[in-house]
Amino acid sequence: MEVSENQRIEILRKFLKMSQTEFAKSIGMSQSNYNMAIKEGRNISGKPVYLLHSVHKVNLDWIFGKIDSETPVFINDSKEEDKIRELERELLKTTQELLKYKTRENEELRSKSATAGGQK
């Protein structure tokens, strides 16, 4: 049995564990229009399809039945992954610098404390 585009969109919604209202809003539709389209078999097209791709990162070839899979197929956005890795590297570097600074600061405080204690 072939699965329609709307059935695949409904599979995606359930896979993402979103209510009809949440999901419809995420693709620029009202819940009532989304529900009508799903129940009446009207194709969802235009901006909502674009938002399926850009917001939910679903592969549109899966939506249109060009990829045969029972579960949604998502796109890999390597640019986004690269940005995340770069931010993680920057965060790690900043954390290491902060740790070095705090270590030096603590050593200076101990040294001053030891010096002040010896002068009493």
Image (cartoon, grey):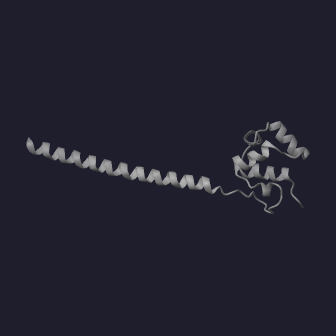
Instruction: Identify the residue at image location x=77%, y=54%.
Output: 60
Instruction: Identify the residue at image location x=62%, y=57%.
Output: 78
Q: In this view, does 93 lie to the left or right of 73?
A: left
How many numbered discs sit on the rendered protein?
0
Residue 41 or 80: which is nearer the viewer? Answer: 80
Q: Is residue 115 left or right of residue 8?
A: left
Task: Say which quadrant the N terminus sits in.
Answer: bottom right
Residue 65 or 36: which is nearer the viewer? Answer: 65
Outermost residue on the bottom side: it is: 68
Q: Is residue 47 left or right of residue 119?
A: right
Q: Determine which quarter of the picture holds residue 37.
A: top right
Instruction: Identify the residue at image location x=38%, y=53%.
Output: 96
Task: Say which quadrant the C terminus sits in.
Answer: top left
Residue 67 rendering spot, x and y as whole percentages: 80, 62
Outermost residue on the left side: it is: 120
Outermost residue on the front side: it is: 79
Q: Determine which quarter of the picture holds residue 42.
A: top right
Residue 77 rendering spot, x and y as whole percentages: 65, 55
Residue 28 rendering spot, x and y as whole percentages: 76, 39
Instruction: Identify the residue at image location x=82%, y=41%.
Output: 34
